[in-house]
Image (tube, helix red, strand yellow):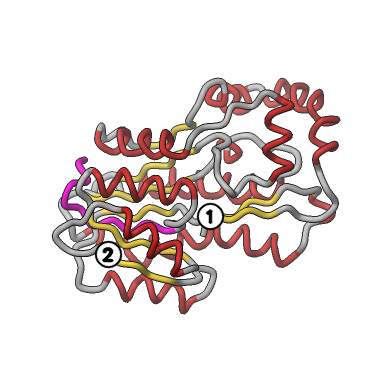
Amino acid sequence: MQVKDCTIVLTGASGGIGSSLARVFALAGAQLILVGRHAAPLESLRAELPAQSLPHQIVVADLLTEQGREQVAHACRGLDIHMLVNNAGLSDFHLFENSDPATLNAMVNLNMVVPMLLTQRLLPQLRMQKRAAIINIGSAFGSIGYPGFSVYCASKFGLRGFSEALRRELIETGVRVLHVAPRATQTAMNSDQVVAMNRVLGNATDDPLAVAAFILQRIHNERWGSCVIGWPERLYAFINAILPALTDRTLRRQLPVIRHFLTPQSTMGESI
């Protein structure tokens, strides 16, 4: 599926992966509806993007609210919408027992429930197209439960399950579903503690532009379904699915390092 001349709704557009997706989509000739919480970074991003026949739109909205989701739906009314990219998200590195209830609620809602609600709103418009797609940006932690990220993992596991079921529901329509699960990425979503922990553990991190280019290539090649970005993370996800006890042993050896970087209070990052 080529994105040239497609209208794409992109949430979390001003974040690291979101802004990178905006750049690669625009360079490929797509018309964008950029959704985020703050006007200034969205305006700055739009100014960088190659101009299309019509200017890229900006929607400043809090997707955790019904009003915010209605703003997105309103911006899409009367348009041919070809793709929805659910990218907005929250991450939090902390001990679950010290989790702030408000943060927990916001994370589960933004990472899992909001993509469902936006998809439900825009699906009738997507189905009007001969070819359309829903792209859900998950995480490798949607396949591997990782200490310190219990709520984040739960929300991303849920998004992966939703994507899988929806893809099967829509298999006889022109709407395709792609769930992409990046590993650690060099964005502001990762706190200083997470960056330091990844360095000590030797965890690879990807440039967000490389992640965006991978996603675009996946769309162009029409390779739908679900994929984890990066090796050996793809292998770890497979092993965790069939031999979780082996993953238990591996992560238990990492626990002293993880605990060293954990703080009692939440360390939250956002891409909204």
**Left or right: 9 with respect to 196?**
left
Residue that appears at 63% across and 64% down: 106
Assess disc 1: are there few (<14), some (14-19) or many (≥20) residues with their C-alpha within 10 Å of its C-alpha. Answer: many
Residue highlighted by disc 2:
124
Residue that appears at 20% across and 73% down: 78
Q: Circle 1 — which element? A: strand
Q: Position of residue 108 (x, y in %)?
A: 61, 58
The kind of secondary structure the magenta stretch mainly shows is loop
Q: Residue flagged by tag 1: what amino acid is it?
A: Ser
Q: Position of residue 13 (x, y in %)?
A: 42, 56
Q: Is residue 101 above or below residue 19?
A: below
Q: Is residue 89 magenta?
A: no
Q: Earlier in the sequence, mark 1 or mark 2?
A: 2
Residue highlighted by disc 1:
271
What is the span of residues highlighted in magenta in the rendered image?
1-11
Q: Residue flagged by tag 2: what amino acid is it?
A: Pro
In the foreground, 116 or 212: 212
